[in-house]
């Protein structure tokens, strides 16, 4: 910047080490900026001799873009993605942000993502992208965003020191079945390419192997009860004593199919699902399931993006990621109390 060039918000952003959107919110006295960040921006403005152009400010839209977030969501017809997305949107609204939602549902995923990103770039202060497929995630990672963008931080397998939601689900599934004495188990995964299915499977296999269990990977389902019912034909109850199913819908369909083959649950085969759907209580036998906070996960995603926009500390994932097994009859040992129990 020369002596004769008037400083811009981009100069201030570089000086304060924040985004230009943050500088814009400070200039316009908008909310959603941490006090420390606001002070850094004011200090940079003073040092650079920056001041707001009042004429330009008066010509601005009465609804500025610095409180607008672009949201890209995928597979909203599924329980997990819809639960996460609804909670994330509510969290953004409660924090004072507006949002525009773009959905990705089949078809050319890369093209849909690219179009949404083009529309949001330059018109939002951040992008919340809730990817469910590897294809969508790769498209997002290939894009160089000029504003903060959240993809799947904390909701994947995470790190050894900070396990993510899917890591916790896989871990507690293996620990629950091991605690009940199962040493040879089958896992029926969700569809290939689904991020949660892959993370869940990898976490389960890793923890089960560490516990000395032998895991067989069966055919994949598509998250539906119909696919679980069809997979019942592939079950060999003499080869393993328990099945960990990728979600409750598939698990309920599986138990229906096992009944048709006269395979007893849990007398011949224990069955464990994920999501703790209301229907899990109303099947015979009642389905044991891993409960994880879909709403809390969505709130965590929103708060992580907000912290990046505001330049404030990230939220503590441990306050949001709560995972435990709700034990019911489908995994109960012979003579065990089938009432609901909490594990972890």
Image (cartoon, rainbow, N blue to C red):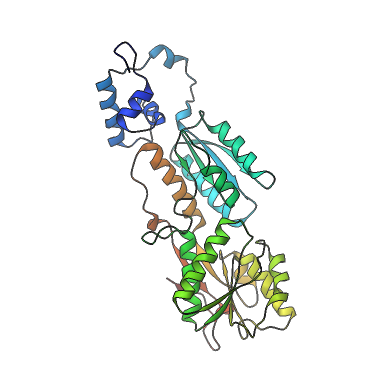
Q: Is residue 332 above or below residue 51?
A: below
Q: In the rendered image, which quarter is residue 222 located in?
A: bottom right
**In the image, farthest residue toward the bottom:** 335
Q: Judge left or right: residue 183 versus residue 30.
A: right
The answer to which image quadrant residue 281 occupies is bottom right
Left or right side of 298 for 230:
right
Quadrant showing the N terminus: top left
For this view, does 279 lie left or right of residue 91?
right
**Count of numbered badges drawn on the protein:** 0
Q: Nearer the viewer, residue 32 or 143?
A: 143
Q: Is residue 136 above or below residue 63?
A: below
**Residue drawn 67% across and 72% down?**
254
Q: Is residue 37 above or below residue 46?
A: below
Residue occupying the point 51% across, 56% down: 294
> Which residue appears farthest toward the right when viewing the image?
260
Q: Residue at x 52, y 61 (%)?
A: 199
Residue 20 location (% of width, % of height):
40, 28
Which quarter of the figure is the C terminus placed in?
Answer: bottom left
Residue 284's x, y, as percent? 65, 77
In depth, the one of 284 and 238 nearer the eye is: 238
Q: Residue at x 41, y 30 (%)?
A: 21
Asked if one can make out residue 325 in the rendered structure from this viewpoint, the answer is no
Q: Is residue 29 left or right of residue 129?
A: left
In percent of width and height, residue 238 lies at: 64, 86
Q: Is residue 218 visible?
A: yes
């Amino acid at each position: 910047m020369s002596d004769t060039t008037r400083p811009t918000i981009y100069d201030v952003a570089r000086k304060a080490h924040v985004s230009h959107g943050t500088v814009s919110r400070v200039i316009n006295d908008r909310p959603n900026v941490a006090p420390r960040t606001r002070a850094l921006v004011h200090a940079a403005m003073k040092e650079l001799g920056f001041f707001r152009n009042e004429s330009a400010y008066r010509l601005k839209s009465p609804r500025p873009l610095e409180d607008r977030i672009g949201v890209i969501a995928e597979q909203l017809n599924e329980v997990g993605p819809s639960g996460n997305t609804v909670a994330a949107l509510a969290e953004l609204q409660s924090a004072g942000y507006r949002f525009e939602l773009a959905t990705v549902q089949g078809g050319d995923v890369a093209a849909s993502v690219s179009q949404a990103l083009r529309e949001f770039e330059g018109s939002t202060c951040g992008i919340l992208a809730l990817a469910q497929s590897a294809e969508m995630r790769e498209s997002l990672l290939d894009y160089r965003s000029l504003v903060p963008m959240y993809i799947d931080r904390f909701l994947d397998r995470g790190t050894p020191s900070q396990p993510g939601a899917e890591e916790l689900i896989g871990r507690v599934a293996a620990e629950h079945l091991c605690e009940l004495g199962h040493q040879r188990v089958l896992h029926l995964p969700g569809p290939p390419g689904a991020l949660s299915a892959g993370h869940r499977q990898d976490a389960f296999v890793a923890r089960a192997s560490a516990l000395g269990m032998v895991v067989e990977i069966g055919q994949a389902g598509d998250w539906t009860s119909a696919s679980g019912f069809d997979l019942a034909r592939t079950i060999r109850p003499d080869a393993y004593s328990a099945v960990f199913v990728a979600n409750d819908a598939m698990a309920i369909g599986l138990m229906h199919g096992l009944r048709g083959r006269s395979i007893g649950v849990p007398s011949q085969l224990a069955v464990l699902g994920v999501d703790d759907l209301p229907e899990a209580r109303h099947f015979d036998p009642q389905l044991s399931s891993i409960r994880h906070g879909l709403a809390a996960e969505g709130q965590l995603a929103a708060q992580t993006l907000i912290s990046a926009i505001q330049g404030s500390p990230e939220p503590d994932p441990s306050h949001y990621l709560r995972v435990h097994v709700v034990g019911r009859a489908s995994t109960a040992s012979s003579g065990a109390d089938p009432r609901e129990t909490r594990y972890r």
